[in-house]
Amino acid sequence: MIATVRTLFCAAALLLGATQAIGDTLTIPVGQQGAAAAGAPARGEAAAGVEARLGAPLQRGQGVGAPPISRWDYPDFSVYFESGKVLHTVAKRRAAVTSSAPD
């Protein structure tokens, strides 16, 4: 009898205590995601090859961490390097284009 009551109590506690995961979904239409920056270096490309193809960056960040990860800034994107190879390329945000047409 006590085992049955304990089982029922545990089952009720589980059912009452169960929570549902709640979250938001952010949907960005494909046309607003932004295209890959034209001429952006590919992962694994050598730093010397990036500089030969794109020229000197506007700014070179110092390496941080171990192994050091550094950033080169170009007008449309930033390139992150690890051990002299492209790790990732990040496109820079552009200001939203607004229409100033007269009413």
Image (cartoon, helix red, strand yellow):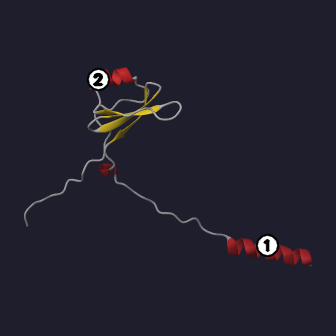
x, y percent for residue 78: 34, 37
Give the secondary structure at mark 1. Answer: helix
Seen in the image, is 44 located left or right of residue 14? left
Residue farthest toward the front in the current orientation of the protein: 62
Q: Residue at x 12, y 59 (%)?
A: 100
Which residue, given by chain and number where applicable, does mark 1 sit on?
10
Seen in the image, is 103 located left or right of residue 98? left
Q: Earlier in the sequence, mark 1 or mark 2?
A: 1
x, y percent for residue 17: 69, 72
Above or below, 12 relative to 82: below
Q: Quadrant of residue 21?
A: bottom right
Q: Which mark is residue 31?
A: none
Which residue, given by chain and number where applicable, does mark 2 sit on?
53
Question: How far apart, in angstroms, are the residues tagged by discs 1 and 2?
Answer: 67 Å
Q: Amino acid at mark 2?
A: Arg
Seen in the image, is 70 located left or right of residue 94? right
